[in-house]
Image: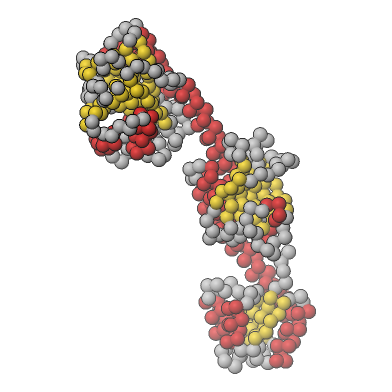
C-alpha cells in the first residue's frame, strides 16, 4: 500500500496557504509549506516531495518559472505541479502554465473537493508512471543479470554475478543461495549495488519447498548473510525449484523494495535457477565424459629399469564431450611400446574411434610388427571399417638397455629430444591415418643416457590466433630445461603452454633414460 503523499504548498498569502494546507491535511496528505519561489526550489532539492501546489504570482520568481525549473531538472522532471491562481485566470494564463510544465491549472475560487480530487488524480498518474519506470528499470537490469549469469564460466562466479545483479535491480543488499552438483550449499552475497560480491558456505533447510516458484517473508535473523538495513523487519525469499530431485535456489532481498507479487524477483529466481541447472548438467556430463575417456586410457605407467616415465593428460575444460587424444606405454618382448595420437573431432564418436585405434595399435605391436608396419595395418583397418575418419599417431619401440628407438609417425607433431639444454625435433613426415598414400621407412635413432624424449598432442601448442611454428618455438623454449621430477616437468609444460581454459584435450608423455 502506498504511503501518504507529501505535498508542497507554495503561496505568499498566509491566509490562502492556511486554507490549502488545511484542506489537503484533512484529505490525508502530508503537507509542507513554502512562501517564495526560491524557498520552494530549495524544498524540492532537499526533501522527498510527491506533488507541488504552486501559486502563479510569487514575490520573487513567478510560478511559471518555478515550475519550468523543476521540470528541467532530470531528477525531478516527473514531479507533478498544480498551478493555482486568483489573478492569472484567463485562457492565455492557463495555456502558458500547462505549456511550461504544469500538470493541472486551478483558478480561484477553488472548492476543497476540487483541489483534493485534482491532487488525487494527478498523483495517481504520477505514481503509475513511477511504478512503470521502476519496473522498466528493473527489467532492464534483470536482462543484464540473466545474460551475465548465463555467461559465467563456473558455479562460484555465477552466484557472485546473480547476487550482484539482484543488488543492482533492487538497490539493496542481496543473497543468492544454491547447491552445487557435489551437494555443497553456497551463497553469493552482495552488500549493495556498488559492493564487490563474494561467495560463502551456507546451509538451508529445503524441507517442504515445492517444485516451481514460491515467495515467503522471513525475519532477517534467519538469513544473516549480509548486514541488512536496520529498519528492515522482513525479507522476501523467492525459491525456485525446477526438479524434485534438485535443491531449490533462493534469492533474498528486503521486503520493503518489492511491488505486489514481486514479479521481477520471481523472474530473477527462475532465470538464475535455469542457469544453475544448466551448469549442474554441464558439470555432470563433463564428469561422466572425463571418467569415460580416462577409462579408455592406460590405468598405470609401467616401472622399467633405467627409465623414468611421466604422463599428463588434461581434458578440454570448455567441452562436455570426450575427445580423441590417447597415449600408450606398455612393455612387449623386452621393448617399450610408446604411442600417442589424436583422432579428428571432439565427441563420443571420436572417443570410440580413439579406443579402436589404441587397441589396434597394441594388437599389431603384440604380433611383433615394427612401428611402420603397425601404422600401415591400422591405416588399412581405418579405411576399410572407419571410412572418412582421420587420425594422427606416433608409434615408437624403445630398447631400454641400449636406448635404441624405432619410430614411425602418421601426420603427428614431431617428438622432442632434450639433453643439456639442447632441444631436437625428431621429424618423420608421413600422411595421416585414413589417407591412402605411400609411407616412408621408419626412423631409427638412439636416446642418449640422461636425455628426455617428449611426445605430445596438438592441444598443447595449437592456437586459433597463431600458426603451429610459433607453438613449436614456445614448446622448445619451455622444454629446454627438464625438471628432475618428470611429473613436475609435464605439469609445467601444460601450465605454461596451454591456455587457462583448455579448448582441446592435451596429452604430454615424457621418457628419460637414466
Q: Answer yes or no: is residue 406 visible.
A: no
Please tell me which residue lies in front, 297 or 158: 297
Relative height, residue 349 to residue 244 (above, below): above
Q: Quadrant of residue 113?
A: bottom right
Q: Residue at 34% across / 16% down in the picture?
A: 305
Q: Position of residue 23 (x, y in %)?
A: 76, 82
Of the 4 image quadrants, the one containing the N terminus is bottom right
Task: Please state if 207 lies on the left or on the right of 312 as rendered.
Answer: right
Q: Position of residue 100 (x, y in %)?
A: 55, 80
Task: Please state if 51 lies on the left or on the right of 341 as rendered.
Answer: right
Colour convention of the picture: secondary structure
Relative height, residue 117 to residue 363 (above, below): below
Q: Position of residue 116 (x, y in %)?
A: 73, 78
Q: Residue at 25% across / 22% down in the picture?
A: 449
Please tell me which residue lies in front, 109 or 54: 54
Q: Position of residue 310 (x, y in %)?
A: 37, 25
Task: Please state if 214 lies on the left or on the right of 393 as rendered.
Answer: right
Of the 4 image quadrants, the one containing the C terminus is top left
Amino acid at each position: 500500500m502506498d504511503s501518504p503523499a507529501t505535498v508542497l504548498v507554495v503561496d505568499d498569502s498566509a491566509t490562502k496557504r492556511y486554507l490549502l494546507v488545511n484542506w489537503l491535511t484533512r484529505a490525508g496528505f502530508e503537507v509542507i509549506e513554502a512562501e517564495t519561489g526560491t524557498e520552494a526550489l530549495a524544498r524540492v532539492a532537499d526533501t522527498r516531495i510527491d506533488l507541488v501546489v504552486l501559486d502563479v504570482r510569487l514575490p520573487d520568481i513567478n510560478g511559471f518559472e518555478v515550475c519550468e525549473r523543476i521540470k528541467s531538472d532530470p531528477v525531478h522532471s516527473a514531479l507533478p505541479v498544480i498551478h493555482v491562481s486568483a489573478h492569472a485566470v484567463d485562457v492565455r494564463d492557463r495555456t502558458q502554465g500547462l505549456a511550461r510544465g504544469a500538470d493541472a491549472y486551478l483558478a480561484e475560487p477553488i472548492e476543497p473537493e476540487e483541489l483534493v480530487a485534482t491532487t488525487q488524480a494527478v498523483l495517481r498518474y504520477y505514481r503509475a508512471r513511477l511504478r512503470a519506470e521502476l519496473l522498466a528499470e528493473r527489467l532492464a537490469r534483470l536482462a543484464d543479470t540473466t545474460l551475465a549469469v548465463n555467461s559465467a564460466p563456473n558455479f562460484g562466479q555465477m552466484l557472485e554475478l546473480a547476487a550482484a545483479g539482484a543488488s543492482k535491480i533492487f538497490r539493496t543488499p542481496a543473497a543468492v543461495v544454491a547447491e552445487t552438483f557435489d551437494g555443497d550449499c553456497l551463497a553469493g552475497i552482495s552488500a549493495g549495488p556498488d559492493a564487490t560480491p563474494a561467495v560463502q558456505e551456507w546451509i538451508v533447510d529445503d524441507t517442504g519447498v515445492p517444485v516451481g516458484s514460491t515467495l515467503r517473508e522471513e525475519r532477517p535473523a534467519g538469513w544473516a548473510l549480509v548486514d541488512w538495513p536496520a529498519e528492515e523487519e522482513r525479507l522476501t525469499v523467492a525459491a525456485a525449484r525446477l526438479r524434485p530431485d534438485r535443491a531449490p535456489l533462493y534469492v533474498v532481498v528486503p521486503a520493503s523494495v518489492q511491488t505486489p507479487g514481486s514479479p521481477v524477483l520471481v523472474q530473477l529466481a527462475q532465470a538464475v535457477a535455469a542457469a544453475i541447472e544448466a551448469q549442474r548438467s554441464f558439470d555432470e556430463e563433463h564428469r561422466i565424459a572425463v571418467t569415460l575417456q580416462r577409462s579408455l586410457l592406460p590405468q598405470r605407467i609401467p616401472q622399467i629399469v633405467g627409465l623414468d616415465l611421466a604422463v599428463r593428460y588434461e581434458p578440454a575444460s570448455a567441452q562436455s564431450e570426450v575427445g580423441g587424444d590417447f597415449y600408450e606405454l606398455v612393455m612387449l618382448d623386452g621393448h617399450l611400446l610408446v604411442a600417442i595420437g589424436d583422432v579428428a573431432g571432439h565427441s563420443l564418436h571420436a572417443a570410440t574411434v580413439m579406443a579402436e585405434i589404441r587397441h589396434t595399435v597394441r594388437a599389431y605391436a603384440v604380433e611383433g610388427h615394427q612401428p611402420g608396419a603397425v601404422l600401415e595395418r591400422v591405416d588399412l583397418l581405418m579405411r576399410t571399417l572407419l571410412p572418412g575418419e582421420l587420425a594422427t599417431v606416433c608409434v615408437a619401440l624403445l630398447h631400454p638397455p641400449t636406448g635404441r628407438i624405432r619410430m614411425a609417425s602418421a601426420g603427428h607433431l614431431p617428438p622432442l629430444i632434450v639433453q643439456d639444454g639442447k632441444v631436437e625435433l625428431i621429424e618423420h613426415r608421413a600422411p595421416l591415418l585414413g589417407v591412402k598414400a605411400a609411407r616412408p621407412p621408419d626412423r631409427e635413432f638412439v636416446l642418449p643416457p640422461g636425455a628426455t624424449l617428449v611426445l605430445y598432442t596438438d592441444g598443447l601448442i595449437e592456437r586459433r590466433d597463431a600458426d603451429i611454428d610459433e607453438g613449436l618455438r614456445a614448446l622448445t623454449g619451455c622444454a629446454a630445461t627438464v625438471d628432475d621430477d618428470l611429473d613436475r616437468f609435464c605439469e609445467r609444460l601444460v601450465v605454461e603452454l596451454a591456455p587457462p581454459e583448455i579448448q582441446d584435450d592435451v596429452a604430454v608423455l615424457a621418457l628419460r633414460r637414466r
